[in-house]
Image (cartoon, rainbow, N blue to C red):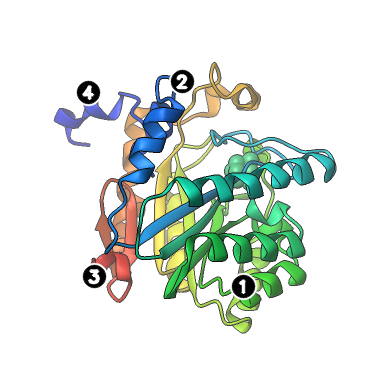
Amino acid sequence: MKQAWIPFASRPVPRYTSYPTAADFTPQVAETEAGIWASQTASDKPISVYIHVPFCEKLCFYCGCATSVPNGYTRIAAYLEILHREIDLWARALGAHDGMAHLHFGGGSPNALSAEDFKDLVAHASRAFGLRPGAEIAVEIDPRGLTPDFIHAMAASGANRVSFGVQTLSATVQQAVGRIQPKVLLSEGIARLHEAGIGAINMDLMYGLPHQTVTDVEEAAHFAAEMGAARISLFGYAHVPWFAKHQAAIDEDALPGLEARFEQAEAGARTLELAGYQAIGLDHFARADDSLTQA
Ligand code: SF4
């Protein structure tokens, strides 16, 4: 490990999966300000829309996302009602723009929605924001709850990119983080997505999980490459149990130390680069033919 990097590697920083990052969405950003920003779209530029689905069947112990277990569909239905109203509100608040080029569903697990509700949401957002021809519709998926109905709904709605939460293939680590998903479940899910015509598959991998080793990370990286993932994110686990209470279920003594984390991150990156992926940003990798690499 490069000693000079230690001070930086030990500092908690927000994940730049969006800008501004989630930590910046505070009450200080008032409705008026948000409205002013929204009205400043450029009439000759497309927009991107993100829809959050904050529900999961079960919480993974490591998760830091804004999500919860709905315990039935009533809460999901109530959320959807407000979400549909919010789509209309934003459509009215936006200034002139050149249509929606990206529609991204994240979570939580967007496949916590029923197939019909998902189709309705895509149709509504497409009408409200004007879906451009060739637009990207991407959906984050929990492979454990991926049903044929939901795959069909995604294909019928024009979804063309799916992000698969893989994290780790090690049975020991999966047990330690409360997320059991055998490799065969992942490969079968990917095969069914391909059959439905959804070709671009992203995969999320993690390092720094309890009991995780360099070999585990390499195995997951090899798997993602073998499955032909278009983009791969390799995130380090952030242990913040004071913020994400369910992380208290993680055995702190089993967490790899700073140096071990760093070795895992480097081993994952090396494996992906040897498999032909290009490193993009802090923790993303993409195939040479992927639009992210080209951009
Ligand atoms: S399925 Fe994804 S969003 Fe849901 S708890 Fe697990 S990691 Fe978090």
In the image, residue 146 lies at what x, y percent?
Answer: 71, 62
- Mark 3 — residue? 294
Q: How many marks?
A: 4
Circles 2 and 3 in contact, beta carbons < 8 Å: no
CA–CA distance in space, label 2 to label 1? 35 Å
Which residue type carries mark 3?
Answer: Gln
CA–CA distance in space, label 1 to label 3? 26 Å
In this rendering, the answer to whether 172 lies above or below 43 is: above
Residue at image coords 26%, 50%: 281
Front label number (2 vs 1): 2
Question: Which comes sooner in the sequence, label 1 or label 4?
Answer: 4
Q: Please tell me which residue lies in front, 25 or 42.
A: 42
Residue at image coords 45%, 37%: 208
In the image, residue 82 lies at what x, y percent?
Answer: 68, 42
Circles 4 and 2 in contact, beta carbons < 8 Å: no
Looking at the image, in which quadrant does ligand 1 appear? top right
Which quadrant would residue 36 be assigned to in this image? top left
Say which element carries label 1.
loop
Question: Which comes sooner in the sequence, label 1 or label 3?
Answer: 1
Front label number (4 vs 3): 3
The C terminus - image quarter = bottom left
- Mark 4 — residue? 7
In this rendering, the answer to whether 5 lies above or below 190 is: above
Question: Which comes sooner in the sequence, label 4 or label 3?
Answer: 4
- Mark 2 — residue? 27
Residue 157: numbered disc: 1
Front label number (1 vs 3): 1
Which residue type carries mark 2?
Answer: Pro
